[in-house]
Image: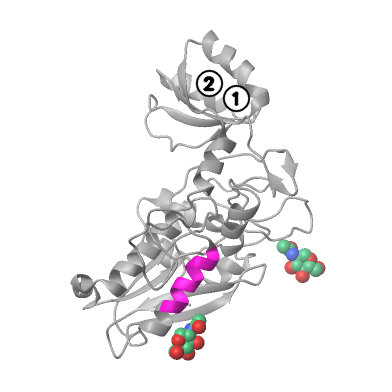
Amino acid sequence: MSLLYAIALNCVFVTSQIMAEENGVVSYAGFQVWKIKPSSEGDQQFILDIIDSYELELWSKRRMARDPMDVKVPPQSQTKLKSKLAERKISYVVVISDLQTAIDNQKTKVNRIISNWKPAYDMGWISYHTLNDIYAFLTYLNTTYPKLVQLTNIGSSYEKRPLYVLRISDSSSAGTRPAIWIDGGIHAREWISPAVATYIIQQLVEVPANAKLLSNVDWYIMPVVNPDGYEYTHTKDRMWRKTRSVSNTSSCRGADPNRNFGYKEVIANKFKPPSLFQMMQWGGLGASTNPCDDTYRGTIAFSEPETLAT
Ligand SMILES: *[C@@H]1O[C@H](CO)[C@@H](O)[C@H](O)[C@H]1NC(C)=O
Ligand SMILES: *[C@@H]1O[C@H](CO)[C@@H](O)[C@H](O)[C@H]1NC(C)=O
């Protein structure tokens, strides 16, 4: 594929944490998510400065100084964070009182399909789905609508799962028209993203009223760029973000796929402001060199088979 970049705007800067593991399944029992309300830039910086030492993880995108900050707080930091915030008179509310309970509640909804919805495939868009369901859906479409869709395997993930791209085109000369590229699931734990990408696919392929959206362009949609990571979030660690490649130098696995792409000046120069193309250089803004970080860039550009294939 010649499609080089998916600009995944993602500003979660995090450090890795050691968590209790049971049968290889990571537990978030006792973890909480707090919405902290800084009332000045100073307050905001105060919180940013203690993120590492308190093993916090910032879940919200930082915009204005006084925007609330959603922060994942491990059990061992809750008491000291509470007094630290009280000292500085920064208020907060606990929005998730037990992260594992929230994950368990979400799991019971995976794959639950409403009773009067009986499509030919095991997919719906009121709950999240496993990789198997998503891949079965793509295969079903490929078989059922041969004139409209073409499912291509563009390569294999680190753990040898197929990397599927679905082309949707009503043209007999598909591939010659302008194209729209959509990808999802580059960060394993962001489940909404494959859900949206598959929903767009369903709407384009199966809803006749949307046929006009196919009239001038070909669509290329890759709903799960990081299938190993996505599967891992369903089976082992709901908060996993990276690929699952094994490192030669560290016991920590995976690279952050959207920080693993190489840099092509020709393309990057088209982007304004320059800060945006800086983010797209390998090793650019916000990319970590520590294999244990969730923002780890990988050993070299395109070290991950998922980014290389894409
Ligand atoms: C999609 O269908 C075409 C035509 O039947 C087939 O050649 C191709 O292998 C299918 N793609 C996948 C990934 O199964
Ligand atoms: C790890 O080492 C093997 C064997 O030397 C090499 O093929 C592979 O590319 C290395 N992987 C990384 C991520 O550097």
Q: Quadrant of residue 266?
A: bottom left
Q: Position of residue 78 (x, y in %)?
A: 61, 21
Q: Is residue 212 left or right of residue 25?
A: left
Residue pictured at 58% horizontal, 67% vertical: 306
Q: Is residue 91 left or right of residue 209?
A: right
What is the magenta range? Answer: 131-140
Q: Report if the beta carbon of the residue with label 2 is closer than 8 angstroms to ligand 2.
A: no
Q: Is residue 261 left or right of residue 195?
A: right
Please tell me whether residue 201 is drawn above or below residue 78 in the rendered image.
below
Residue 134 covered by magenta stretch: yes
Q: Position of residue 51 (x, y in %)?
A: 59, 29
Please tell me whether residue 162 is drawn above or below residue 233 in the rendered image.
below
Relative depth, front residue between 132 and 52 = 132
Residue pictured at 73% horizontal, 42% vertical: 21
Q: Residues within 10 Å of mark 2 (few under 14, many from 20)?
A: some
Residue pictured at 63% horizontal, 39% vertical: 15
Q: Position of residue 167 (x, y in %)?
A: 38, 78
Q: Which residue position holds label 2?
A: 46
Q: Which residue position holds label 1?
A: 50
The reply to whether discs 2 and 1 touch (Cβ–Cβ < 8 Å) is yes
Element type at marker 2?
helix
Element type at marker 1?
helix
The chief SS type of the magenta part is helix
Judge whether residue 199 can be spotted in this image.
Answer: yes
Q: Residues within 10 Å of mark 1 (few under 14, many from 20)?
A: few
Please tell me whether residue 32 is drawn above or below residue 158 in the rendered image.
above
The amino acid beneath tag 2 is Phe
Is the image coloured rainbow, by chain, by secondary structure, or in one colour? Answer: one colour
Q: Report if the beta carbon of the residue with label 1 is closer than 8 angstroms to ligand 2.
A: no
Tally of numbered discs? 2
